Amino acid sequence: MNLKWEDLSVGTQLPEREYGPLTITDFVRYQGASGDFNPIHHDDAFAKSAGFPEPFSVGMLQAGILGSYVTDLFGAENVRRFSVQFREQVWAGDRLICTGEVVAISDGADAGTGERSIDLKLNVSRVGGGSAIKGEATFVVA
């Protein structure tokens, strides 16, 4: 679903999307793909010995979910900037909600690029919890 320029203005809320519930298997699959094999993300005894109640997700898993959410809306080829800030841990069983809002629009004339673009404020929240990730992105929009 690609959103079009005509559909967007400052304040436009992007359609939210839910992911999950996440599982330890999801954590391990991400660890295998990323090469981050820290046992705190899959080994219950290790996580408890480090002071956590159980293993928790690799933060970049949520960042990847957020990236997929916005590229599904605007196309991976249109990303110009994407950044995230980790806010809260994600646990097995959590369901995540991705949301976004258009915070700025440019027709490209001011930058001399001719590319119409939008700036987005993004969020991944845990159902029943807080914000796991806050993010920002800029996309070119056809």
Image: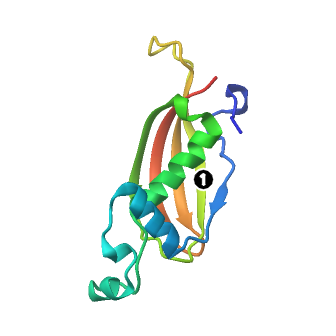
Residue 35, by quadrant, is: bottom left
Q: Is residue 38 above or below residue 8?
A: below
Q: Is residue 79 visible?
A: yes
Q: Residue at x 65, y 33 (%)?
A: 9
Q: Is residue 76 above or below residue 93?
A: above
Residue 103, by quadrant, is: top right
Q: Nearer the viewer, residue 76 or 35?
A: 35
Query: For this view, does 57 lie left or right of residue 98?
Result: left
Residue 104 rendering spot, x and y as whole percentages = 54, 33
Give the residue pinned by disc 1.
Answer: 99
Residue 75 rendering spot, x and y as whole percentages = 59, 34
> Farthest residue toward the left?
50
Q: Is residue 121 above or below residue 97?
A: above
Tell me the quadrant of the picture where the C terminus can be found: top right
Say how the picture is coloured: rainbow
Tell me if mark 1 has few (under 14), some (14-19) or many (20+) residues whose alpha carbon lies within 10 angstroms of its own.
many
Residue 6, by quadrant, is: top right
Residue 121 rendering spot, x and y as whole percentages = 51, 45
Q: Nearer the viewer, residue 43 or 100?
A: 43
- Amino acid type at circle 1 is Thr
Query: For this view, does 59 lie left or right of residue 142?
Result: left
Q: Is residue 130 visible?
A: no
At numbered mark 1, what does the secondary structure look like: helix, strand or loop? strand
Q: Residue at x 39, y 87 (%)?
A: 53
> Farthest residue toward the front?
32
Query: For this view, does 49 lie left or right of residue 77?
Result: left
Tell me the quadrant of the picture where the N terminus can be found: top right
How many numbered marks appear? 1
